[in-house]
Amino acid sequence: MSHSATSSLPALGPLGRVAYACAANGRRTTMVWVLICCVLGAFLPQLERSLAGSGMWATGSESVAARDAAQAANPLAASSALSVVIRGPRAYGQDAAFRAAANRVAGVLRSDAAVAGVVGPTKARLISPDGRTVIVSSGAGASPKEMIRAADRLLQKIPAASGAAYPAYVAGLSSQWADFNRDNRDATLHSEKYALPITLLVLAIAFGSLAAGGLPLLITAIGLAVTGGTLTLLTHVFDVSLWALTFTLIFTMALGIDYALFIVMRFREALKDHTDPAIAAAVTMDTAGRAIAFSGVTVFAALGVCFIIPSPMPRSISLAILLSVALVLVVMFTLMPALMARLGPRIDAGAMPWRRRRQLRAPKPDADQLMHRWGAFVWRHPRPLAAAAVLILVVLALPLAHLQIGIPGDSILPKDASSRQGATLAGAAFGPAAIAPVTAAVAPADADRALAVMRADRDLTGARRTPGRPAGRHIIIQASLTVAPGSRAAGKQIDRLRAVLPQGALVGHAPAELHDLQKAMTGSAPLVLMLILLIGSLLLLVAVQAPIIALAGTLTSTLSTGAALGITVSVFQDGHLSGLLGFEPQGFIDFWVPVFFSAMIFAIAMDYTVFFVSSARERWDQTQDARTAVVHGLGRSGPVIVAAVAAMLAVFGSFAFSPAVPAKEMGVVLGVAVLLDAFLVRLLLLPALIAIAGPRAWHQPAWLGRVLPSFSLSHGQAPQDTQTPADQPVATYA
């Protein structure tokens, strides 16, 4: 079908001009995106296999240097080495079938290209006192990423080799990460299966039509497909953590739906003023597009700061999220206008019954709309409402006072996970750190002294020199801790050991790597959080051109973030609602949660700030009346915020009931954060604070106006349609 424009194009900014070009050439734009999706989508099935195992170590730390030294000197002593724990019905020395099972397991280990050397239970002296539990040890002959992949391969082969009478479990750090990754991957795909139809239902109800509700989901799905294919290609350049899959999926779905929902609502408004859908799409992107572009910049700023954390895991997750946000924005600015112009008034196709009835009735005046009435109520009672909101947020944040940071152990894995069962068996037979010892890589001249120090240490047992390669640069001394490898006590023991060993000694293995990572994360947390607040404040100041509102927006975002983290402590550390959510509390919060989730929550919160402030700013610019700005801002942005929250809760809620604890944690934390930020902050506290400030809220000092770049989020009404000049491009729709 073709359609000639009957109206001229209003004066547009860059985003509006790009949108009009894409809408006016809708067929070509769509075909380009179909081609991009086909090309990049072809790489999507390879994504899971291409992602790296964990990246959970501190770059440049002593433990990483120790890992490299140990792998070079004795692969069996490397932290990524694999152990197989076998349990028999009778004592190993008296059961020939038990020994045969161990030999078969050793043969399977030797057949894997990533394994460098295998030692049986007798030679390694890893036979339990009762003789019924033994460990077959193997060396790490590849990178940590490849050892995790090797563990994944062996998880199926090893039990088959040992036989049902002699259950065997692949254990060790690499196996643990393989189980973590599989559990989170399965949980992510399980949650996504429910998230998409639930979100479609929520959007259809919010918009009152299937077409309007389905468009944001379609755009988000395209963004995810393009992101997945691009990530697969990037893994050939550098490692990307498998954990990026979960974070990218949940964050991209949330922001993509959020952005598309905002644009579709604005497009429906623009259709009332412009008969040409292409012009309506261009005007929409020229106004709403600026808001989501600013939100995207805020996301880049908040998550880009996480690159300060010296660890591959948070850096690769941040990179994946930033890439996905960038690609979703490109889809929004190009394909979205083409599809909206193609639909035009049919954006309301498949209207729900109540939507059809509402279309037949005369529209209500603004003052009679629910959100306008709420805005008027907030304006009349700003002080008590603000005080109540602050009180609730502060009370919810109180559990942060007893926040405990820890390293997740195998207790968050399913009880039938191989690494968990192997660690439990080995711990019962040989002690808590049997398959996660501590190692010291020392110069040959210091070996005797270091061995004496470790043997005299009350917190270590079984200190011994491991066999090394001839003419090696390091001698590897290995011992077991007397406490669980990931515990706080283990970290204290490692710090004390480093202080007493000869200078130049490198303390490593799994307990030290996890301890160093936790120190790196917590050590960089103050700087990361400070930069997030500072950069967020500056960006908001540029966007609203009003220092009081920028300060209020930043402080309220900080309050809502603190409240969300407080609830996280109450649920995941203290165990409240653990029965309902179906998990076993660890007594602490995972060490990466405060920093990483603060960045994500702050980025999401900025969306709602932009939605409200942009609408309020428009009315302030038109009327210079503070009351009208607040009431109109809530009246216009309120429905968008409520619909966006409902869609986000559908996404986050599907993860909150995931069987995997990290995915569950993410769903609960982000879901609570969105709920609090929308209803207590953006629809209540922030408007109340602006109402209290009155006209001063919009004041900009003259000196600041000279310093700040000129920028506006205002969604002012575009000029009405007029006749198209001859040189104006004509929109065509395939």
Image (cartoon, rainbow, N blue to C red):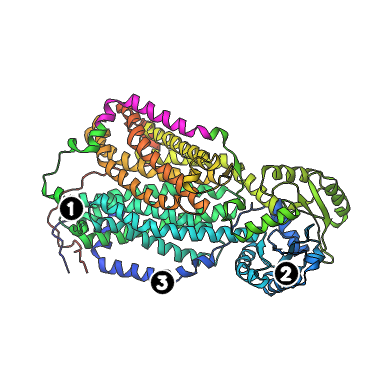
Answer with left or right where residue 493 lies relative to residue 337: right
Q: Which residue is mark 3?
A: 39
Answer with left or right where residue 345 lies relative to residue 292: left
Above or below residue 331? Residue 58 is: above
Gap between marks 1 and 3, in whole Å?
A: 40 Å
Pick whichever of labels 1 and 2 is earlier in the sequence. Answer: 2
Is 388 magenta? The answer is yes
Q: Which residue is mark 2?
A: 116
- Quadrant containing the N terminus is bottom left
Gap between marks 1 and 2, in whole Å?
A: 67 Å
Q: Could one spot residue 712 in this view of the protein?
A: no
Is 170 magenta? The answer is no
Residue 464: x %, y % from top left = 83, 55
Foreground residue among 62 and 158 = 158
Q: Amino acid at mark 1?
A: Pro
- Which image quadrant for residue 728? bottom left
Q: Amino acid at mark 3?
A: Val
Residue 252: x %, y % from top left = 41, 55
Foreground residue among 342 and 291 = 342
Which SS class for mark 2?
strand
Answer with left or right where residue 233 lies relative to residue 163: left
Residue 21: x %, y % from top left = 27, 61
Residue 467: x %, y % from top left = 83, 63
